[in-house]
């Protein structure tokens, strides 16, 4: 079953602000050096992509967002922020690990705050209903992939399909630079991580994911309870 978003492109401001919300959670744990380093790499990426000089007075995530978002016609600002986040984590931690997990939770808080109907005390949760609610929420936020669908498996896992995801080009770049991998070598997927956090809220149990298919032009991830 596939559901389409009623728009061709994600909202650059909404998408960038959601990602920055996740980074704020990392900042609480890793401190101001994390944010300062991320901003440095974000501006360095802009300079490399455009050849333009970047301002030297950007010190906060809000300032970074306000600098990047008006340039959405040149490059997706959320690519720049995610790229900088991956590079910074690898520089500080050696790999994407605890920080990436914290960021995923931070992003999911923003998504779940937009859905006041999802309950965490349900018995025999209908995961089809839960993922449909997730899709409705990210569509309303204007950050959903162009198409999204799922399949419930007999073993209780859920296969989630994203077609024409707006993060695809950024994932390709990050994989080529050996950035978007978790400590166990598995690929990072921001939408899958948010889906798993949404499942966690609905079921009261932890969820994880594995990327099964990447860039075909769709991606398929398997969500499961460890």
Image (tube, rainbow, N blue to C red):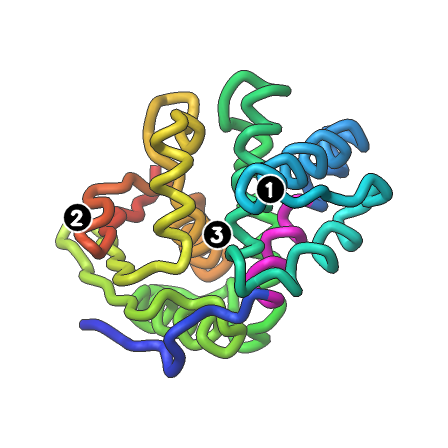
16 is higher (above) or lower (below) than 35 = below
**Residue at (50%, 73%) from the top-left corner?**
142
On screen, residue 38 versus residue 200, left or right, reads right
- Which element type, helix, strand or loop, lies under badge 3? helix
Closer to the camera in the image, 131 or 122: 131
Query: What's the CA distance linking mark 2 and mark 3?
Result: 20 Å
In-image side of 175 versus 114 (left or right):
left
Sequence-wise, the earlier of marks 2 and 1 is 1
Label 3 environment density (alpha carbons within 10 Å; few <14, some 14–19, many ≥20)? many
| Image marks 2 and 3: residues in contact by CB distance under 8 Å | no
Q: Main secondary structure of the magenta part?
A: helix
SS at badge 1:
loop
Give the labeled residue for mark 1.
Answer: 51
Residue 123 screen position, x and y as percent: 39, 65
CB under 8 Å between callouts 2 and 1? no
In terms of sequence position, does the residue under pointer 2 or pointer 3 come before the other? Answer: 2
Residue found at the far bottom of this picture = 6
Q: Please give the label number shown on residue 155.
A: 2
The residue pinned by badge 3 equals 197
Q: Residue 189: x and y, percent?
A: 39, 45
- Specify the label residue 62 is tagged with: none
Residue found at the far right of this picture: 57
On whether residue 20 falls in the magenta region, the answer is: yes
């Amino acid at each position: 079953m596939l559901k389409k978003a009623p728009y061709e492109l994600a909202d650059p401001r909404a998408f960038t602000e959601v990602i920055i919300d996740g980074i704020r959670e990392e900042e609480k744990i890793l401190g101001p050096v994390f944010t300062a380093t991320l901003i440095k790499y974000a501006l360095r990426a802009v300079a490399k992509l455009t050849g333009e000089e970047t301002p030297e007075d950007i010190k906060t995530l809000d300032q970074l967002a306000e600098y990047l978002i008006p340039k959405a016609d040149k490059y997706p600002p959320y690519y720049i922020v995610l790229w900088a986040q991956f590079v910074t984590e690898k520089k500080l931690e050696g790999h994407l690990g605890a920080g990436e997990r914290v960021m995923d939770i931070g992003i999911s808080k923003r998504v779940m705050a937009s859905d006041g109907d999802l309950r965490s005390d349900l018995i025999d949760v209908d995961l089809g209903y839960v993922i449909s609610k997730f899709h409705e929420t990210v569509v309303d936020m204007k950050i959903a992939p162009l198409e999204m669908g799922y399949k419930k498996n007999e073993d209780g896992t859920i296969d989630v399909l994203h077609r024409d995801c707006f993060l695809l080009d950024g994932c390709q770049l990050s994989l080529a630079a050996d950035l978007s991998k978790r400590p166990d070598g598995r690929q990072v997927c921001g939408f899958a991580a948010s889906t798993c956090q949404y499942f966690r809220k609905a079921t009261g149990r932890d969820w994880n994911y594995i990327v099964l298919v990447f860039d075909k032009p769709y991606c398929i991830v398997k969500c499961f309870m460890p």
